[in-house]
Image (cartoon, rainbow, N blue to C red):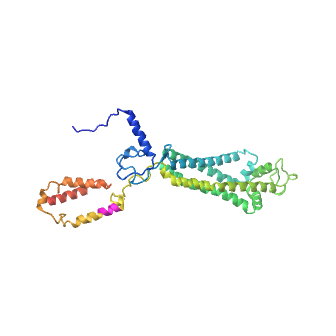
Amino acid sequence: MTDRRLPPKITDFNEVENKMYTITSLSNSTDTIPNNQSEVGPNLPQDEKDRSPTKPGVQRGRLYYGWTKSRWLLLFSNIFFMLYATMAFIACMVTYGEGYTNAPIVVAANASILGVTLAFSLLSMVVACIGMAGIIRKDRRLLGWYCLWLWPCFGLLCAIGYLGYKQDTWNLSAKLGMQWRYNLSSNARIALQNTLHCCGFDNPSDHATYFDRCFPKSLLPGCEYKLHQFESSFLKTTYIVAFSFVPVQLIVMIFAILCSNHVTLQFGRRARPNIAYLNGHSDWRTWEQEQKQKKASESECDAKGLPYKFSPIDLYSPGKFSLESEILQAQDKTFATGGAALSSGEVTRRRSGHRQVQR
């Protein structure tokens, strides 16, 4: 019956509590880890007990109320991003629902700007929810998608400011005249005339849509002056607000890119994975050293695989040409370098070489 090591029974719960407090206090320290330290850090998962928690000489991170500094920065930037995206969405909904006096003018004369603003607000709220889920769950995949989709949000925000600036800068009166005469529908003209208390563009006979307040002999003035005044003020406000949020959006994107990989203390502290084309090595330097050692060992053997300095007395040494000891040593060396187990072909080759030595 084999001896099995059983875990020690917990008799003193105060001692266990003191140990947990010590581990937590060590995780909040900023001391560097010495080269000979091999105990598992408190921020690593339980399946990494046999790995070193960090590289030698790397400074520990510090937790603030259980979260890293990068995670707090991500949280605050994402909350602010969600706030102004939600405000833009509410403004669009109130405008489409005609919640204030001049809302019909915005809907009729600035449909493109309103549509881009609605697309920006919807996409930004979805992206902010993805980012919040990634921050809470400490999921780097979700945070990667969050960083990626922040770029379309940035493009839509710039498009809002560009459309407002372009419409306001170059000959606004002529643009409004062309829009009134060729682009607006009858319902849009009625909404503008009813809201601005005017009739026609220049006068009641200039492309007017008649209803009970607007008719050919109406004394109401044309809509050109009032529409120009409102549009000039609205467009300036639009592109100033949009361009003022561009630096804020850039800061949110910079925080997302720089902090998304540091929501935990594990980034950059695990052992590097093995590279397939380097035969199970994680670095080309270790692969190069193995190749040099292999060439040196091959140069010390003849064509049959026997060493040049071979003596029949070596056959009587107990472990020098033992097949099982040779295979076990090779496997231990492979596991130590991070590679996979020996293949069946490699084991067969070693056994055939061992038989040649025995002959």
In the rendered image, residue 217, in percent from the top left (x then y), is placed at 88, 52
Residue drawn at x 32%, y 61% is 287
Q: Is residue 101 visible?
A: yes
Compare residues 194 and 292 and report the one nearer the observer.
292
Identify the main secondary structure in magenta. Answer: helix
Q: Is residue 172 left or right of residue 68?
A: right
Q: Is residue 342 visible?
A: no
Residue drawn at x 78%, y 55% is 229
How many marks can you see?
Answer: 0
In the rendered image, residue 288, in percent from the top left (x then y), is placed at 32, 63
In the rendered image, residue 206, in percent from the top left (x then y), is placed at 82, 57
Q: Is residue 30 left or right of residue 334?
A: right
Q: Is residue 231 magenta?
A: no
Q: Is residue 269 left or right of residue 244?
A: left
Q: Is residue 280 left or right of residue 321?
A: right
Residue drawn at x 65%, y 49% is 88
For the N terminus, the quadrant is top left
Compare residues 155 and 251 and report the one nearer the observer.
251
The picture quadrant where one finds residue 208 is bottom right
Range of magenta residues: 285-290
Q: Which residue extends farthest front? A: 31
The picture quadrant where one finds residue 299 is bottom left
In the rendered image, residue 309, in percent from the top left (x then y), is placed at 16, 65
Q: Is residue 335 above or below residue 303?
A: above
Residue drawn at x 56%, y 46% is 129
The picture quadrant where one finds residue 233 is bottom right
For the C terminus, the quadrant is bottom left
